[in-house]
Amino acid sequence: MAALAYNLGKREINHYFSVRSAKVLALAGNDSCEYLLSSGRFLGEKVWQPHSCMMHNYKISEAKNCLVDKYIAFIGDSRIRQLFYSFVKIINPQFKEEGNKHENIPFEDKIASVKVDFLWHPEVNGSMKQCIKVWTEDSAAKPHVIVAGAATWSIKIHNGSNEALSQYKMNITSIAPLLEKLAKTSDVYWVLQDPVYEDLLSENRKMITNEKIDAYNEAAVSILNSSTKNSKSNVKMFSVSKLIAQETIMESLDGLHLPESSRETSAMILMNVYCNKILKPVDGSCCQPRPSLTLIQKLAACFFTFSIVGYIIFYIIHRNRHRKNKPCSDLESGEEKKNITNIPLSPLEILLQSFCKLGLIMAYFYMCDRANLFMKENKFYTHSSFFIPIIYILVLGVFYNESTKETKVLNREQTDEWKGWMQLVILIYHISGASTFLPVYMHIRVLVAAYLFQTGYGHFSYFWIKGDFGIHRVCQVLFRLNFLVVVLCIVMDRPYQFYYFVPLVTVWFMVIYVTLALWPQIIQKKANGNCFWHFGLLLKLAFLLLCICFLAYSQGAFEKIFSLWPLSKCFELQGNVYEWWFRWRLDRYVVFHGMLFAFIYLTLQKHQVLSEGKGEPLFSNKISNFLLFVSVVSFLTYSIWASSCKNKSECNELHPSVSVVQILAFILIRNIPGYARSVYSSFFAWFGRISLELFICQYHIWLAADTRGILVLIPGNPVLNIIISTFIFVCVAHEISQITNDLALIFIPKDNSSLLRRLACIAAFFCGLLVLSSIQDKSRH
């Protein structure tokens, strides 16, 4: 029990030290390799979280790709041998721990040209020194990575004597210059000794105490770190295994050797230290160098800088004018002259002001997710981390309710509310890592489908009722959807398809527009005079459904269309359009369902079949009760089916056809009772009005590493970090929504001649962007 108390005490001290030192290092500069090798914590039983950065879980193919033509050497005692086996099993899981334990163990994968050796040297003595010395000679084949460490044998053989510790210091002092020399061309790691669980140690190991281990570790750190006089040692201390052992040593079989899961964690850390800078995985931010600025990013930085300077100049001029025009008192009459009316801002000043604010916001985006200035951590899913926040926002949403201005089905307040609570649920889903829990994943898929359903419903309703197929409407919608994403593609150096939802709604908007705008243009005003036009519109919708089915089951045709230049520049991700095809196919019918629902609803409304008065049920009492019962049963049936899903790919195949069941069930439950239509949640509606900005901004300033991790602004305090980062994230999303609206008035004027001139400038801008992008791609290759 003394050992357990010792370990628990050390764990608290180490955690405090890690958090404190991390904050200091964050101010001085982010050295994520330092964090990876020295600090971290367990998120769950087996999930290790390095302090400040994200650790990638390497697959066999990735490990082989990274270590091709590499030689790795492990040199030390039985604990280093354990680490060697775990490391090799990342490359070859079938490799067995067999053979004489007290001898060298070779491993080689000839196909991948990877060589990993374990060299049995349980003591820091002349034998280990000679082995290391051979590698320092010019003719010797030097390992690319050297992992060394030993001490427990020295303690055991010499019964923990002080003379043995003195000899250890002398021996490691003689080895230190050799390791330092090797560290100039190879990666050299000295593994500090892990604590033991003294209660489980056998009699012949009782002399190996945690006090002795600490003394040996202090000697190793002191000598190796002082081996160079005027600079920092190149030999890296692998001390994180101590923290891992403090959490798991109680599970040891003999009190000395770590359980397999702990060894696997240490081996994966070694893999991240070496391979992250080579393969640059998105979810492996530890040890990754800061990406260099691209030509487009540099030009964007110049543009925003000029905008900020220009706005400051305009502001100073405007302020001076305001001072000159200030009212002054008439001394003779004792009256103050009337104040001059404030002059409204000119379009140029609004433009500069908007780009000034946008430039500052984009600088924050870049610092959060590209500059390695702030920390990042992996997600870890627990049921409480998802469902408790859901309950919180549900209570807030119910508390802030108001009466609607109108009581029609899916009125504006109601659709804003719907978008709002769905967006909040999706945000919680993303930050909690709930995609690993299949029932939650399937329900979130329905929420994404519901957004697309609203796209079909909303745009169809507008074109059907208004009959406005003018270019101004199209440009207005396209600008609203795509402005932020285009800016982020430039600033964050990401492809358009990376923000997959925006391409989805953009393409579907154009599909709706083309379907309804092509001859014959059928709108409600025309159809009211002749029912034949209703039939004509249904034929149009049937043809659209046929095209959707053809593209869904003809991947080749779909990929040929979207692989054509310049469409390929928009829809390719990692060199192909498969991801775009997968995303489009996953919700291929729901926009059509939204259009069809809008047509049926507006037709019933026109023929006064529905009762949409305040407090009135949508249908007669009997029909309303029946539809409510069917809707509730359908809603629950879908939830039961989604919760019983066992295979994601099989459920994804059914999802496009069945997601509309829960969507329609929700609409009927929300709209059939008159009292439900008469109120809405102003809390959810507020978020609904900025839902697009929330969805896009989360990629970089709430989540991190392109949504794979979590942004850490306040290290060591997860709750406070979430509160502060969420507040900033929501404020930024709201401000971007305002900026987009302001710029839309300038870039998309109602006057057609002015609009055409703006479109010509926008077209020239995108042509220039394509040229610069091509130059960048060539320079990268």
Image (cartoon, grey):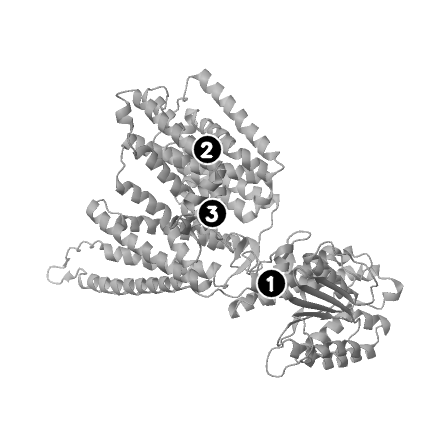
Per the rendering, the mark at residue 549 is 2
Q: For the residue labelled by badge 1, is the local secondary structure a helix, a strand or a loop?
A: helix
**Considering depth in this image, is 492 or 557 the residue closer to the camera?**
557
- Residue lying farthest bottom? 229
Report the mark closest to the observer, 1 or 3.
3
Question: Residue 592: x, y in percent?
Answer: 42, 32
Q: Which residue is mark 1?
A: 275
Type of the residue with mark 3? Val
Question: Residue 605: x, y in percent?
Answer: 34, 23
Q: Quadrant of residue 286?
A: bottom right
Distance (Cα) linking label 1 and label 3: 28 Å
Question: Which tag, 2 or 3, sits closer to the chain's start?
Answer: 2
Type of the residue with mark 1? Cys
Q: Residue at x 64, y 75 (%)?
A: 183
Structural crowding at the residue carrying mark 1, measured as other residues with C-alpha within 10 Å and reported as few (<14), some (14–19) or many (≥20): many
Distance (Cα) linking label 1 and label 2: 43 Å
**Considering depth in this image, is 569 or 318 the residue closer to the camera?**
569
Give the number of callouts: 3
Q: Which residue is mark 3?
A: 577
Distance (Cα) linking label 2 and label 3: 18 Å
Q: For the residue labelled by badge 2, is the local secondary structure a helix, a strand or a loop?
A: helix
Q: For the residue labelled by badge 3, is the local secondary structure a helix, a strand or a loop?
A: loop
Structural crowding at the residue carrying mark 2, measured as other residues with C-alpha within 10 Å and reported as few (<14), some (14–19) or many (≥20): some
94 relative position to 454: left or right: right
Q: Is residue 225 visible?
A: no
